[in-house]
Image (cartoon, helix red, strand yellow):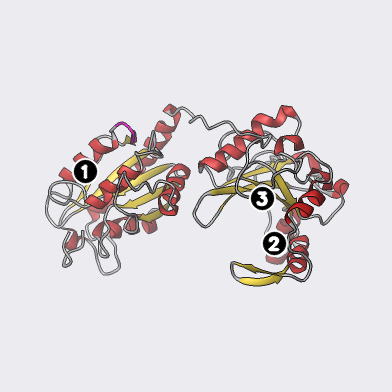
Amino acid sequence: MKLLGLVGSNADLSYNRDLLQYIQKEYVDLFDLEIFEIKDIPMFNQSQDLTESVLIQNLKRKIFQSDGVIIATPEHNHTVPAGLKSVLEWLSFKIHPLQDKPVMIVGCSYYDQGTSRAQLHLRQILDAPGVGAITMPGNEFLLGRAKEAFDELGNLNDEKTRQFLGETLHKFVRFIGVASQLKEPEPLPEEDLHATGQIATTIPDVDMHAEDWVEQAIEKVKPVKGATYVELDRGILTVDQINALLKSIPLEITFVDANNQFLYYNHNADSAQMFAHRKPGQVGNPIGDCHPARTYKHVQAVIAALRSGQTERVQMPVPTHGLDKYVVHNYAAMHDDEGHYAGVNEYILDIKPIIDFYLKKTGQQLTGGSVDAVSSASQKVTPPIAPQVDAISSASKKD
């Protein structure tokens, strides 16, 4: 289970951050907790819409991809800090990632009340239209006198406090399970699999369906080639070196852009020898042209989930390649430097040789259970995917 811990303070020193860090290390066997800092997110200003900024989009994706959220809030003037309130404003302005998301509230304070009034206020905010979180009822973890609560290693000193926190966290895990049964799947926008629109990198006036799309596009845009150097994120390579590098990678790599146009695959084998059977004449096609119509709803489900930020990656074993192989199709969302969706990187590989190599080198064995060539206990596919898819406070205090 994956949870997101939201530090409700933008202070450099915060007992609420310490509490989340304690939960993160102490309950690693119960869930995977990722801690998110709000201190770099600018204050909410409707006149300067930053909904599409990297920071807010990144937070949106992390909330979407988590099973639940733990918010650790200080108490400032009997309420939540301005920074936390501002973040919740961003998350209910044009985007609503907390809608129907299970949330648990915890909090530390210097005094005996342990953020009780702030927690009550936060519950009201989380219940507001536009936020719509499912806040766990009847369980408050209020840590008062926080300065004395932690030892030098960041652990909670009091045994009863540790026990109560553990009980509350176990209840939250069960609460997430119950809440997930009540939640209706969020409808995602329909994907244009025929790429009828355009994006900034679309090459205009070249027929996407043409067998020689690549040659026509080259003639149109005059791309660099050969020994011409290309500046990359961390390195400089020639076009020839980039091609050689991509062909040498022992994966089948396919790139579909944000307009759902199939633009590239690393052509290192003939079509008949490939798991996905890519053909040179398919490059340039809308992704819909690369699949039979019966698979469209599954292709749309994968792309819509990646585009929306509901998930960053979909993994799907495909059993049709024989019992001597375990072929996995991986679909990863790509983003530009501004955090905007940039397309799908599909990479396909047979992982059985990797597993065999590992077992041989370590002397370990696979034991127990039966082989299921279609699904995996560690696999989480959202939404459902069918096997046919081959697509592409003050400075002196911590709060």
Residue 393 screen position, x and y as percent = 17, 59
Residue 90 screen position, x and y as percent = 34, 44
Tell me, yes or no, if residue 168 can be seen here.
Answer: no
Magenta stretch: give its range. Answer: 129-133
Looking at the picture, does residue 233 appear above or below residue 338?
A: below
* First reached walking from the N terminus: tag 2 or tag 3: 2
Identify the residue shown where x is 53% and y is 32%: 188
User: In whole angstroms, how far apart are the C-alphas of marks 2 and 3?
Assistant: 15 Å
Image quadrant where residue 388 sits: top right
In-front residue for pair 370/384? 384
**Apparent side of residue 187 relative to residue 268 in the rendered image (left or right):** left
User: In whole angstroms, how far apart are the C-alphas of marks 3 and 1?
Assistant: 48 Å
Residue 108 screen position, x and y as percent = 21, 54
User: In whole angstroms, how far apart are the C-alphas of marks 1 and 2?
Assistant: 49 Å
**Apparent side of residue 225 relative to residue 338 in the rendered image (left or right):** right
Judge depth for marks 2 and 3 and give the one in front: 2
* First reached walking from the N terminus: tag 3 or tag 1: 1
Classed neighbour count for the residue bearing mark 2: other residues with Cα under 10 Å, few (<14), some (14–19), many (≥20): few
Amino acid type, residue under disc 1 in the picture: Gln
**Apparent side of residue 150 relative to residue 194 in the rendered image (left or right):** left
Judge depth for marks 1 and 2 and give the one in front: 1
Circle 3 SS class = loop
* First reached walking from the N terminus: tag 1 or tag 2: 1
Residue topped by disc 3: 367
Identify the residue shown where x is 78% and y is 48%: 325
Identify the residue shown where x is 28% and y is 33%: 128
Q: Tell me, yes or no, whether the highlighted magenta stretch contains residue 236.
A: no
Mark linked to residue 28: none
Mark linked to residue 119: 1
Tell me, yes or no, if residue 124 can be seen here.
Answer: yes
In-front residue for pair 180/271? 271
Residue topped by disc 2: 358
